[in-house]
Amino acid sequence: MPRSLTENFVKQFELCKVTSGEVVAVIAELGHKEEYVAASVAAARQLGASALVLHASSLSSPMLPPYEPDGREVAALLAAAGEADFVVDCTVGGLIHSDVRTRITGNGKRMLFVAEPNDVLERLMGGEDLKADVSAAGDVLRDGNTLHVVSAAGTDLTADVSGEDLPITMQWGYVDVPGRWDHWPSGFAACFPKDRTAQGQIVLQPGDALIPWQRYVRDEVTIAVEDGFITSITGGADAHVLNDYFESWDDPEVWALSHMGWGLLPQARWSAFDVYDPRTLYGQELRSTAGNFMWSTGSNRFADRETPAHLDVPMRGCTVSVDDRVVVRDGKLV
């Protein structure tokens, strides 16, 4: 029988090692995702922890410009969250690319972003096996020098992933050690290649995904990449829409490639955008689908690049190699 939202939060908080005596801080936006806030508080109480709810008037970035950041509430949020042991991000857009996230985790706090409908949270909940798979993929990236992605459609992209200081993201859906951030649900490994090293072209095919637009690509799109930046987007209707989106920000940084990696979550389904109302989804299922190749644009704190214009683009049918090691072949995990 499916679990209730609170029951799933209890199970998740157990994975996150929430214990009696801890303080849980819940960051949310006033009037949004109240059921997640209530489930967070109830789960914390059931595990013997106390809970503090921090409601901001608005923390989400707009989907299109104009954009004027307003950080008046951030200092107060950080001061309160700094006294907690475990922080739950229930905001609409998530504090993934914000200074709030890095400052909270930098102080040794565990931080979890929660999105997606309840049955997706339950179906895609992580565990030790997924953690091991994601960690192994992270080790492959850490030991590598060149990431190479090709596809029968014409994708041929390389990026420099060398160096011990390569920023690597390993998401298995829960936070069980101090200073860790993760996203429930999740299951992928990715990295931020050395800035301005991505070269080649990406060819999107119908059925690839555009997130956070939460829809599938409708026609072929060819994207040229030089020195880490998109230099041209050609094709049909989707190419026009992508060009319009990037141009609307009037900011050269939005054309940059950011992180890239591959999905490792076997129970994630590519069909999610058609099975569910896409307005209820955050898109994490397609980001995490086993055997995808996912790349993103815009925000990259390791390159001092901050912009609210951000797309994640999971693709099917690619072959992904790190040096001579193939990790995904034709969209299937090796």
Image (cartoon, rainbow, N blue to C red):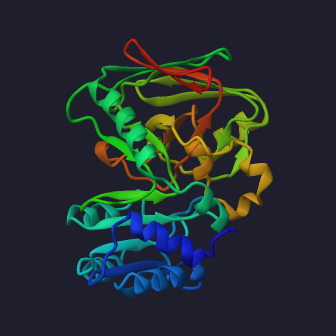
Q: What is the x, y in percent for residue 168?
A: 33, 40
Residue drawn at (35%, 85%), measured in percent from left and top?
A: 48
Considering only vertical position in the picture, is 130 above or below 70?
above
Give the percent coordinates (x, y) of residue 50. Answer: 34, 88
Query: Which residue is at the far front?
Result: 1
Would you place residue 177 above or below residue 138 in this image? Answer: below
Judge whether residue 91 can be spotted in this image.
no
Residue 100 picture quarter: bottom left
Left or right of 164, for residue 123: right
Q: Position of residue 299 (x, y in %)?
A: 42, 48
Up-down relation of residue 168 to residue 13 (above or below)? above
Task: Identify which residue is drawn at 50% across, 41% down.
Answer: 297
Q: Position of residue 206 (x, y in %)?
A: 76, 32
* Residue shown at 21% from the left, 64% from the top: 108
Residue 296 visible somewhere in the drawing: yes
Would residue 30 appear left or right of 242 to someone viewing this image?
left
Of residues 155 and 329, which is closer to you in this image? Answer: 329
Count of labels in the image? 0
Q: Residue at x 27, y 35 (%)?
A: 166
Vertical relation: 184 (above or below) 58? above
Work out which quarter of the rendered image holds the N terminus and state it.
Answer: bottom right
